[in-house]
Amino acid sequence: MQRILVIGAGFAGLWSALAAARRLELEGKNGLIEVTLIAPDPILTLRPRLYEAAPGSMSAPLEKLFEETGIRYIQGSVETIRTEHDELDYIDANVSRRTLSYDRLIMAAGSKLFRPDIPGLREHAFSVDQLDEAAALEVHLQSLVLQPSSLKRNTVVVAGGGFTGLEIATELPTRLKGILGTNTEVKVIIVERADAIGPDLGSGPRPKIDEALTQLGIEYRLGSAVSSIEAGGLTTANGEHLETSTVIWTAGVRASELTSQISAERDPLGRLRVDQNLRVASSPKVFAAGDAAVAPTDDQGNHTLMSCQHAIPSGKSAGDNAAADLLGLLPTPYSQPQYVTCLDLGSAGAVVTQGWDRNIWMTGAEGKAFKVMINGTLIYPPTDRDTAFAAANPQQALSL
């Protein structure tokens, strides 16, 4: 039996598998071509929500959905990909090495937080990148109340003033007061190496971001790279030492290291460069989506970013096109000209922008309601077969 093999159960992987299964059913080929998804666990981690409190609940089970849609799930971690032989090796749940062949491969292994070789970073910094890491931070924050009150205990330093850094930083004042007491004076400091806060967000939303940080009493240091992290604080390259019991590292992500095993052009973030059909040019049987790929979104020169906003639609296109290619059908080019940014700003609301110039669309409570809708509803997986296949149509855009 021929096989379409998907690596990863994140947003791109899930929707790739669903779109491939949908296309096979439409063409009357379900049962003749197998759609297989391999990942360490059959869950969708709601990664965009990991900056929130109670991150342990930020996942959704997928086994029932896989069963209903005819997707074969394999629990395992991919180790080696051999595109010249159309196969890969993985370690299964029993820690045994196995080999799996494919006729079309969809790389949707996602990304991970980049941790440079900074002294003390791995030993002393927390993160909100993966479910277990966000849960560890939550346990740590809850334990702070057991320590004597001090400036060090009541201070959190967030390394990185980009999208994730801003969301966790603006969440923290209310979260910390809920743990330490409403009358506790808490301090949150953002350390950002660029000369502007939210450097990748551009100038459009910056006034609203600055306004929110001021409202929440959040300090930030610009042009300050992190030099070292210790158990009791952080030191910048400028020589400033910030005393804290809690450092949260958010400075940048990189595509899964598995992308390096595919002979192809990659961008500086390690993402595979794909064409408008989500195919890797140098490996015709390989498609890629989500954080593992960089694809053109329109004819204006814009490309996908590492966000579920691009992972879900690109996954749908990759899955549909992989199935179509295996069946000898014409592909449907991926296109996503609409672009929206929705940045949570904690109790100060949210700022929502439209377009690649990031013109402000909504702010404050209105923006917050929009963000809550995205985090609480839009990014969750479907719960039944019919809804899943209807939503897996690549022509159905992610509505924002």
Image (tube, rainbow, N blue to C red):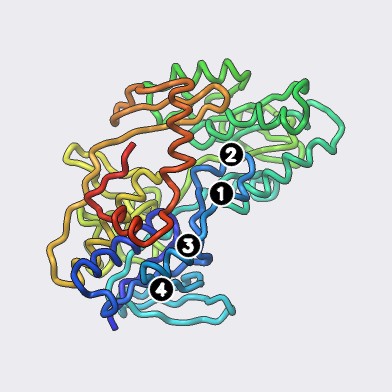
Residues at badges 3 and 2 in contact (C-beta under 8 Å)? no
Looking at the picture, how far across and down is residue 274, in whole percent? 26, 55
Which residue has dot 1 on it? 58
Callout 4 environment at 10 Å: few (<14), some (14 to 19), or many (20+)?
some
On residue 62, which mark appears?
3
Q: Is residue 97 above or below residue 268?
A: below
Depth-wise, is mark 3 or mark 2 nearer the camera? 3
Q: Secondary structure at mark 3?
A: loop
Looking at the picture, how far across and down is residue 192, in whole percent? 54, 30
Type of residue at label 2?
Glu
Type of residue at label 1?
Met
Q: Is residue 70 above or below residue 334?
A: below
Type of residue at label 3?
Leu
Type of residue at label 4?
Arg
Which residue has dot 4 on it? 72
Q: Secondary structure at mark 4?
A: strand
Q: Label 4 to label 3, Cα distance in Å?
A: 11 Å
Q: Quadrant of the C terminus?
A: top left
